[in-house]
């Protein structure tokens, strides 16, 4: 076999000497010269000898080219007997995933793997080489060129490699064994020795081996049946039996997070270990400051629990939240998790009242305005919702761009062009609260709202009026899980006890539209539907909010109901930028419109390292994106100049696949062996014998080198002899004189 078989293509060069020989053959040109005519009758005895010499010289030159090609192809004679101290080029793949941070009896599994590297190096002879690749989200080759084991003293390449491994902390990312194996193959191929070997040190965590990913394995071992580099698996010891309380999920708020608004922080913990956990202290941290502690009394193995803590954000902007368990368990890396959130400073709300003139007070909107901003006049600037009430007559002259939330309160009718303008605004990701009341003109609203573009504003048709002025009709919560009702239902089982309506618009809903509230007779009172693909949302009330048709505005829960309705409408606006990412997900940042020029952006990773990024101007905004998010934890963007924006935080969750507890089975290992992807599964006891029993061979390049040297000497000798014979032809050999 040949180690570099591609070099055999050079055998095509053998045709060159033959072609040169044919092109340079001596051509005899007859010359009519009377004095030398007697030579035509002279037998030239050396002609045949010169012909034989030319052909022999050509064959020698062809042999030189052939030997050079074979020398470069590095032929290997397999099956020969080689001593146990045969030099190796050994490549080691160490699983550096999060699961390798689990503790064994005395140390982590990764620390065990590092100790195993030293053990393997001690077995190998001095003329062996060693290369190490860490299997991470992206493989990290610690030794691009294999290092020699001849010198192991302090300061040597080997000593520096071992020091680097011993100082490396357990990983926190997902790892792909076949991808790392591909990198290890490329590294070990740069070694100087004939015999190659790769050993995989891992905890046999099945997700990291990617058994079903045939594409990755095909790239790692392109031709398993003819693979000349044996690959062995050497598992670490099993993790010790222990509890492992992992912080699996962390959520902040349900939709919108704003200043001075109660925000629920929910943290879920799962015991992925093999024993039960008890009395687990949990700390809640916001922007580096502890805001509360709780205790998990008991958490059996395989079970989960969720803790909740309510928090008020007093400052708008970007914030980060962290929860952590103060416990020594099976895996330290998953004891904490972090998330990031953007707290909105203000939500402008445009309340359009059906009153036809802006003169005087807006009596029909009084309850609504008081519910949206129930504070003293001096505190209005500190509240999240910032309402502005105008007359429907003033709406055409009002710009909608500054208002993510619009309320149409009992508007009699709308011109079609104005309705289309509102529909376009909502389709861009804004919210609309449509309230139907006594002034609503049924036919006018039906005709206009059903024809708005780019999407209809009402997925229903207003039929006749519902009327029960004598006994009143009670209200039923048909969707208690809806975001507008969830907070009320959680705090009070009968959240709308005593609520009743006397009149309402009966709505004939389109298929798929589900009511949130309805009368006990089944007529929808509140419906919710999305508009467009950018997060536009509309909530429609079929009864008024001025206490003329219902007693809803008089109930204590009307204030939170009105606020939760607006928060729900604004939630898509708050979610336009995602601050909680999965591992490897793209990080996106967008500046506010018409911001000042962004000179540079520095991203600080969870491990404290940083990377400088460039924001691109797109229209009236600066945009930035990066996929460098494999490491779980907190990321921070810092802007130059700082006036562009305060620091913005993003959080990356650790890869959920690392929480799985599935290990390679015996059948998994056998399938890898049968496919030729690994040679065998070793133990520490069988490692030395496996190294000695590996297939061996003898490289033939020394012999070929001697042959090339001998052929070069022969070629020089034949060339000199050929030239001497051409220049020194004796007369008697040419037949010009008679030998005595």
Image: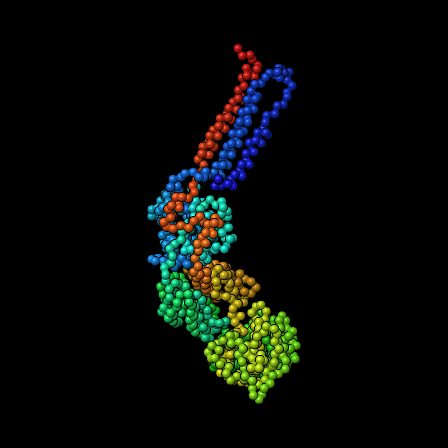
User: Residue drawn at (47%, 38%), measured in percent from left and top?
Assistant: 75
Residue 497 to residue 47: above or below: below
- Residue at image location 62% in from the left, 83% down from the top: 465
Residue 310 appearing in the image:
yes
Residue, far front: 667
Q: Position of residue 308 (x, y in %)?
A: 43, 72
Instruction: Report the residue that reaches farthest toward the top.
Output: 740
Q: Is residue 495 above or below residue 683?
A: below
**Where is residue 594 shown, x and y percent of the image?**
54, 67
Q: Nearer the viewer, residue 363 or 533?
A: 533
The residue lying toward the viewer, choosing from 575 and 201, is: 201
Q: Locate residue 115, reporting x and y percent.
A: 36, 52
Instruction: Give the color scheme: rainbow, by chain, secondary structure or one colour.
Output: rainbow
| Residue 195 x/y as whole percent | 43, 43
Residue ID at (47%, 82%): 376
Whether 145 is drawn above or below 500: the answer is above
Instruction: Give residue 530's quadrant in the image.
Output: bottom right
Considering only vertical position in the picture, is 540 above or below 242?
A: below
Q: Residue at x 37, y 46 (%)?
A: 688
Classify residue 305 by image quadrant: bottom left
Q: Is residue 173 visible?
A: no
């Amino acid at each position: 076999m040949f180690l570099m078989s591609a070099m055999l293509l050079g055998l095509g060069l053998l045709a060159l000497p033959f072609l040169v020989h044919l092109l340079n053959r001596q051509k005899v040109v007859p010359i009519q010269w009377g004095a030398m005519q007697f030579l035509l009758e002279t037998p030239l005895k050396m002609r045949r000898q010169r012909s034989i010499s030319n052909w022999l010289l050509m064959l020698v030159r062809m042999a030189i080219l052939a030997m050079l090609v074979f020398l470069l192809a590095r032929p290997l004679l397999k099956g020969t007997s080689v001593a146990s101290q045969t030099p190796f080029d050994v490549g080691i793949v160490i699983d550096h995933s999060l699961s390798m941070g689990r503790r064994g009896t005395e140390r982590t599994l990764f620390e065990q793997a590092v100790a195993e590297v030293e053990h393997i190096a001690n077995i190998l002879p001095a003329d062996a080489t060693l290369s190490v690749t860490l299997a991470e989200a992206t493989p990290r080759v610690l030794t691009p060129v294999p290092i020699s084991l001849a010198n192991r003293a302090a300061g040597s390449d080997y000593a520096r490699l071992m020091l680097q491994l011993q100082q490396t902390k357990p990983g926190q990312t997902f790892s792909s064994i076949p991808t790392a194996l591909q990198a290890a193959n490329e590294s070990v191929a740069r070694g100087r020795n004939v015999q190659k070997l790769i050993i995989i040190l891992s905890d046999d965590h099945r997700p990291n081996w990617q058994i079903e990913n045939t594409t990755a394995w095909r790239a790692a071992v392109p031709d398993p049946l003819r693979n000349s580099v044996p690959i062995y698996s050497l598992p670490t010891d099993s993790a010790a039996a222990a509890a492992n309380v992992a912080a699996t999920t962390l959520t902040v708020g349900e939709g919108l997070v704003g200043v001075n608004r109660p925000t629920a922080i929910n943290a879920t913990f799962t015991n992925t270990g093999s024993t039960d956990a008890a009395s687990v202290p949990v700390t809640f941290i916001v922007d580096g400051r502890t805001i509360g502690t709780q205790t998990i009394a008991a958490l059996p193995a395989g079970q989960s629990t969720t803790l909740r803590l309510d928090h008020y954000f007093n400052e708008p902007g970007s914030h980060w939240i962290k929860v952590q368990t103060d416990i020594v368990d099976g895996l330290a890396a998953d004891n904490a998790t972090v998330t990031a959130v953007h707290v909105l400073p203000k939500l402008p709300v445009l309340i359009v009242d059906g009153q036809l003139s802006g003169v005087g007070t807006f009596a029909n909107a009084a309850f609504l305005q008081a519910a949206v901003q129930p504070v003293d006049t001096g505190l209005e600037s500190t509240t999240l919702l910032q309402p502005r009430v105008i007359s429907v007559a003033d709406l055409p002259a009002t710009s909608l761009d500054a208002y993510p939330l619009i309320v149409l309160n009992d508007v009699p009718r709308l011109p079609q062009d104005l309705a289309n303008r509102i529909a376009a605004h909502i389709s861009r990701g804004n919210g609309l609260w449509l309230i139907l009341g006594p002034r609503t003109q049924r036919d006018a609203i039906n005709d206009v709202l059903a024809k708005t573009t780019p999407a209809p504003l009402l997925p229903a048709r207003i039929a006749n009026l519902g009327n029960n002025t004598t006994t009143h009709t009670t209200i039923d919560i048909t969707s208690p899980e809806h975001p507008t009702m969830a907070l009320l239902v959680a705090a009070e089982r009968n959240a709308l006890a005593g609520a009743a309506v006397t009149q309402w618009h009966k709505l004939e809903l389109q298929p798929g539209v589900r009511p949130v509230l309805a009368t006990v007779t089944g007529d929808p009172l509140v419906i919710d539907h999305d508009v467009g693909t950018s997060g536009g949302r509309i909530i429609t009330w079929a009864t008024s909010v001025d206490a003329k048709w219902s007693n809803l505005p008089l109930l204590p829960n009307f204030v939170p109901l009105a606020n939760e309705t607006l928060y729900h409408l604004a939630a898509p606006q708050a979610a336009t930028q995602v601050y909680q990412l999965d591992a490897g997900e793209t990080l996106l940042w967008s500046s506010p419109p018409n911001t000042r020029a962004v000179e540079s952006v520095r991203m600080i990773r969870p491990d404290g390292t940083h990377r400088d990024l460039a924001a691109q101007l797109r229209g009236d905004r600066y945009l930035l994106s990066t996929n460098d998010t494999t490491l779980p934890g907190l990321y921070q963007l810092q802007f130059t100049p700082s006036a562009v924006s305060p620091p913005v935080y993003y959080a990356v969750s650790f890869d959920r696949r690392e929480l799985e507890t599935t290990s390679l089975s015996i059948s998994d290992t056998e399938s890898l062996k049968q496919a030729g992807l690994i040679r065998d599964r070793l133990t520490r006891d069988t490692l030395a014998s496996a190294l000695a029993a590996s297939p061996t061979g003898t490289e033939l390049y020394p012999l070929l080198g001697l042959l090339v040297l001998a052929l070069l000497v022969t070629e020089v000798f034949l060339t000199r002899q050929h030239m001497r014979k051409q220049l020194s032809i004796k007369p008697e050999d040419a037949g010009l004189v008679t030998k005595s």
